[in-house]
Image (spheres, rainbow, N blue to C red):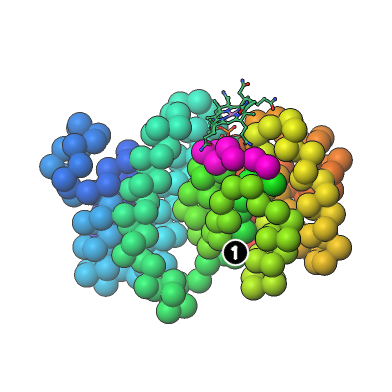
Amino acid sequence: MNNEILNQLKSCIVAGKINAATPFPPEMKGMPGADELTKEALDTGISPSDIMNEALVPGMDIVGQRFTENKIFVPQMLISARAMNASMAHLKPYFVSGEVKRKGTFILGTILGDLHDIGKNLCGMMIEGAGWEVIDLGVDVSSEKFIDTLQKYPDAVIGISALLTTTMSNMGPAIQKIKEISPQTKVIVGGAPVSAEYASSIGADGFGRDPQESVKWLETLVA
Ligand code: B1M
């Protein structure tokens, strides 16, 4: 019974079925979505961490994998993230109370001067879906703002996104300033013009070609 609800919930995440009222996807019209199934799971006594680890995380993992393989595209990924958010709304109180532990904290932002946030937002959603607390600083983030936020979350990992060849050059100095204050802090960078070689040349610890690669790299930190 428990497995059945969790499997259904996982399918909703993968298919992007938010709640019973949403008509998408057409083949699931009228069926309960992530919203109703999460409530039912909690009412049945399934623990919030089982909901997270056995439905949401594996569901988003499939979504990320399909995106990497070009089997789905940005709109499908966004709708799956909305289904995940519908479920997370029921789980948030348990995170706040500490009953469900996160894998860690991830501070995310686009680099100084860069206003492109679509890819950064997708990464944030996938990383949250993988069980991390995401502190999203938004766009055009200065190194001072990353460092200030790090004071509040000293164990956090930092993620920086850049979409312009002109702004990606701001990432190296930002990483240098972050590492001067906190040498042990891990930093991952990504964005269309960024490559693994460039990432390592500016002192980043990790590079994510897409959200799924970023999730996989984060997993190596907590393995
Ligand atoms: Co601008 N823009 N834009 N733009 N824009 C590009 C990037 C550009 C390639 C268009 C072009 O000329 N063909 C070009 C950059 C050229 C270059 O530098 N080589 C460009 C330019 C020049 C500019 C302006 C300078 C234009 C101007 O004003 N003259 C200006 C700059 C503004 C600024 O940032 N200061 C500008 C403005 C804008 C808009 C505001 C209009 C808008 C952004 C809206 C927004 O984001 N809210 C915009 C858009 C939409 C684009 C394009 C069309 C689409 C970007 C996008 O969202 N892609 C883009 C052209 C293109 O890409 N086809 C373009 C979809 C998104 C899902 O992909 O962001 O690559 P992406 O994210 C991927 C990966 O890169 C990765 O995961 C995501 C999912 O796979 N990823 C990470 C991203 N961040 C990551 C972080 C990680 C890990 C992975 O770890 C931390």
The stretch of residues the image draws in magenta is 113-119
Side of 94 where 23 appears, left or right: left
Please name the residue shown 17% across and 47% down the image. 20
List x then y, in percent, for residue 28.
20, 38
Q: Is residue 117 magenta?
A: yes
Q: Magenta span has 184?
A: no
Q: Residue at x 66, y 52 (%)?
A: 141
Ligand 1's quadrant? top right
Give the side of residue 158 with respect to residue 65, left or right: right
In the image, 106 versus 64, the foreground residue is 106
Quarter holding the C terminus?
Answer: bottom right
The x, y position of residue 154, in whole percent, is 69, 71
* Residue ID at (31%, 54%): 86
- Magenta stretch, main secondary structure, is loop
Q: Which residue is mark 1?
A: 105
Classify residue 50 by image quadrant. Answer: bottom left
Residue 6 is situated, as x and y percent measured from the top left of the image, at 31, 55
- Rendered position, 1 above or below 154: above
Percent of width and height locating residue 33: 23, 49
Q: Residue furthest front?
A: 113
Name the residue nearer the viewer: 75 or 5.
Answer: 75
Q: Quadrant of the N terminus?
A: bottom left
Figure disc tally? 1
Asked if one can make out residue 185 in the rendered structure from this viewpoint, the answer is: yes
Q: Tag 1's secondary structure?
A: strand
The residue at the point 32 percent across, 41 percent down is 16
Which residue sits furthest top?
70
Residue 191 lies in quadrant: top right
- 118 w.r.t. 3: above or below: above
Please name the amino acid that badge 1 sits on: Thr
